[in-house]
Image (tube, rainbow, N blue to C red):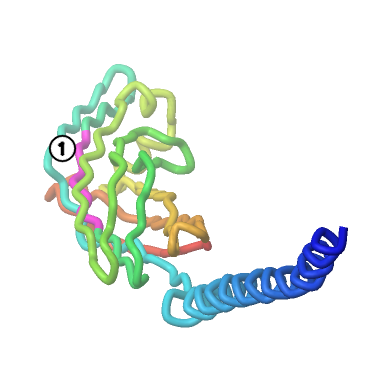
């Protein structure tokens, strides 16, 4: 009994020491994890702080334009194809992935043309060029009575709208959603088949 009692006493004496060492290990581990998290958070708010990508319309040109005038019906038939060169600048220190998007061609507030923009990826601190071809859906213009007046005036007003949505992933911990929009007002001059008076506006939302 004396031997067993002494063993029990030794185990009882060692138990608090083991418990204390375990608590120290857990405390150190928790402190290291917290330190790493704070470091990633600081980097995410400074060096890797999300910045707004910008979509810029570099040029818009006419690749095809056919205009016919129906005298009997006082109607104008327009077939127009525009080539729009875009560039998306990513100022972030991480890549940005964007989803399938679209470019729209509007005539006086009505969508008359649409072109798909396939999903892609823009590397960090890079600018991605895009070319979009938008063709008018002629049937959508037939019902607009103002087209005749614009045709007779020699200039048809259009608007292009491009909206690209994506996200930037920081350390695979933080996802920042980004939407970049560009809209341009322009005139198509019928006589010489050129584009003029183009004015663009850009907007980016994080």
Residue 76: x, y in percent? 29, 29
The residue located at (14%, 47%) in the rendering is: 193
Q: Quadrant of residue 107?
A: top left
| Residue 114, x across and y down, in percent | 33, 35
Q: Is residue 199 left or right of residue 85?
A: right
Q: Is residue 31 magenta?
A: no
Q: 189 and 56: which one is in front?
A: 56
Say above or below: 121 vs 99. Answer: below
User: Is the stretch drawn in magenta largely helix, strand or loop?
Assistant: strand
Location of residue 121 in the rendering, given as x and y in whole percent from the top left corner: 28, 52
**In the displayed structure, would residue 74 be above or below residue 82?**
above
In the rendered image, residue 180, in percent from the top left (x then y), is placed at: 43, 58
**Which residue is farthest front?**
2
Q: How many marks?
A: 1
Q: Residue at x 53, y 74 (%)?
A: 36
Q: Nearer the viewer, residue 27 or 177?
A: 27
On screen, residue 24 versus residue 162, left or right, reads right
Q: What residue span does the magenta drawing correspond to? A: 80-86
Q: Quadrant of the N terminus?
A: bottom right
8 relative position to 141: left or right: right
Residue 30 against residue 173 in the figure, above or below: below
| Residue at (36% x, 57% y) in the render | 96
Mark 1 lies on residue: 65
The reply to whether the magenta stretch includes residue 81 is yes
């Amino acid at each position: 009994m004396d031997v067993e009692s002494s063993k029990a006493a030794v185990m009882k004496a060692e138990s608090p020491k083991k418990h204390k060492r375990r608590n120290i290990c857990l405390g150190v581990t928790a402190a290291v994890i917290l330190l790493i998290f704070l470091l990633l958070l600081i980097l995410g708010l400074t060096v890797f702080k999300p910045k707004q990508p910008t979509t810029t319309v570099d040029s818009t040109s006419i690749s095809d334009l056919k205009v016919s005038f129906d005298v009997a019906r006082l109607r104008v038939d327009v077939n127009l194809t525009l080539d729009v060169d875009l560039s998306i600048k990513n100022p972030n220190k991480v890549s940005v992935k964007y989803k399938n998007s679209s470019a729209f061609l509007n005539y006086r507030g009505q969508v008359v043309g649409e072109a798909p923009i396939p999903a892609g990826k823009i590397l960090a601190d890079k600018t991605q060029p895009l070319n979009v071809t938008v063709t008018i859906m002629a049937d959508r213009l037939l019902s607009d009575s103002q087209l005749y007046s614009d045709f007779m005036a020699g200039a048809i007003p259009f608007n292009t709208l491009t909206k690209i949505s994506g996200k930037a992933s920081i350390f695979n911990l933080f996802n920042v959603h980004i939407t970049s929009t560009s809209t341009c007002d322009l005139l198509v001059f019928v006589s010489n088949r050129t584009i003029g008076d183009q004015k663009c506006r850009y907007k980016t939302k994080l």
